[in-house]
C-alpha cells in the first residue's frame, strides 16, 4: 500500500477575490501517494502549479492535526470530504480511487465570504464568541477534583460541547447555512457548569443576537450539521439552546426571535 499512488483529476474553485467572479479549473496529478493527507495532496498541486509558472491555490490550514478548524474545504459535495468525523487535514488519499475526479470548493455561506479560491472569512464565528463566550467569575487555580460538585454526566456533556473547533462544517452542510450547532455548543459548554451561570441569560441572548446579525439562516432540523461535524457535536445542544433562549426571554426580554428551529 505504501508504494501505491493515484492519478487524479481535480476540479478546483478559483476566485481571485471576494469581488471577483469565480469558476472551476481542472488540474491533473499523476502520482499522489495514498498515504498523503488531502492537504498534502493540495501541496503537491501547488508545487506543480508553481513549477508551471501559475498561481497556486489559496486554502486555509494551520495545525494539520484536526484541532484548529482552519481546513474548511467542501470535497465532492461534503464538508471535509467523505470520511465521517474527520477534518480535511485528517482525510487521507487512500479513501479515493485511482483516476477519480475530485471537486474541491470553499464553504458556501453568505456569512463566510470567499477571500480567495478556497479560503473563506469565518470571523463571524469570532464575533459570536466575543458576544458571550466568557465567564467573569474568578476561577483561580485549579481546584481539587471534588471541590465543586458537578454531576459526571454534566461534566462529560460540557466537555463534548467544548470539543467544537469552530471549523464551520455545520454551516456548510446546512441548506440554510445555520450556525445553530456552533452557537449551541459554545453556549452549552458554559450552561452545564456552575461557573457559567452568572452570565447565562446575557450569554444566550447576546450570542443569538450576534448570530442573527451575521446573517446565518434558521435551523432546518435535518441533522446534516451533526452528520458532518468532525467532532460529533450533538444536535441536543440546539434543543438546550432553544430552551435557554426561551427562558432568557421570559425572564427579561430579548430582541431576537430566530433561535427557534423551523
Image (cartoon, rainbow, N blue to C red):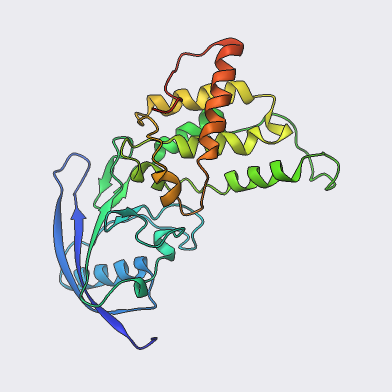
Which quarter of the rendering shows the N terminus?
bottom left
Q: Residue at x 57, y 49 (%)?
A: 163
Residue 119 spot, x, y in % from top left = 31, 50
Vertical order, 238 against 254 (above or below): below
Q: Which residue is most to the bottom?
A: 3
In the displayed structure image, the side of residue 184 where residue 195 appears, left or right? right
The vertical placement of 135 against 3, above or below, is above
Can residue 168 be seen? no
Tell me the quadrant of the picture where the C terminus can be found. Answer: top left
Q: Is residue 23 left or right of residue 259?
A: left
Residue occupying image coordinates x 45% and y 63%: 64
* Residue that appears at 58% across and 25% down: 244
Question: For this view, does 250 lie left or right of residue 193?
Answer: left
Measuring from the top left, give residue 100's x and y in whole percent.
22, 71
Q: Where is residue 217 in the image (x, y as percent from the top left)?
A: 35, 31
Quadrant of residue 168 within the rendered picture: top left
For the residue pair 113 and 168, the one nearer the viewer reads as: 168
Amino acid at each position: 500500500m505504501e508504494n501505491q499512488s493515484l492519478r487524479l483529476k481535480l476540479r478546483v474553485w478559483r476566485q481571485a477575490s471576494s469581488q471577483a467572479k469565480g469558476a472551476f479549473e481542472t488540474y491533473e496529478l499523476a502520482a499522489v501517494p495514498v498515504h498523503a493527507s488531502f492537504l498534502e495532496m493540495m501541496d503537491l498541486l501547488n508545487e506543480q502549479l508553481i513549477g508551471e509558472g501559475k498561481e497556486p491555490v489559496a486554502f486555509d490550514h494551520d495545525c494539520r492535526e484536526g484541532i484548529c478548524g482552519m481546513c474548511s474545504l467542501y470535497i465532492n459535495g461534503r464538508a471535509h470530504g467523505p470520511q465521517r468525523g474527520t477534518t480535511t487535514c485528517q482525510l487521507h488519499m487512500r479513501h479515493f480511487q485511482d483516476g477519480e475526479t475530485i471537486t474541491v470548493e470553499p464553504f458556501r455561506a453568505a456569512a463566510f465570504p470567499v477571500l480567495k479560491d478556497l479560503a473563506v472569512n469565518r470571523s463571524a464565528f469570532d464575533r459570536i464568541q466575543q458576544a458571550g463566550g466568557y465567564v467573569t467569575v474568578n476561577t483561580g487555580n485549579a481546584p481539587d477534583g471534588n471541590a465543586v460538585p458537578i454531576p459526571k454526566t454534566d461534566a462529560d456533556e460540557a466537555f463534548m460541547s467544548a470539543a467544537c473547533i469552530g471549523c464551520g462544517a455545520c454551516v456548510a452542510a446546512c441548506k440554510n447555512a445555520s450556525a445553530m450547532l456552533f452557537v449551541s455548543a459554545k453556549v452549552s459548554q458554559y450552561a452545564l457548569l456552575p461557573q457559567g451561570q452568572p452570565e447565562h441569560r446575557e450569554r444566550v441572548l447576546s450570542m443569538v443576537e450576534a448570530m442573527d446579525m451575521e446573517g446565518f439562516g434558521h435551523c432546518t432540523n435535518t441533522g446534516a450539521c451533526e452528520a458532518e461535524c468532525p467532532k460529533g457535536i450533538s444536535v441536543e445542544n440546539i434543543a438546550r439552546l432553544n430552551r435557554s433562549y426561551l427562558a432568557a426571554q421570559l425572564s427579561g426580554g430579548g430582541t431576537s426571535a430566530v433561535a427557534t428551529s423551523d
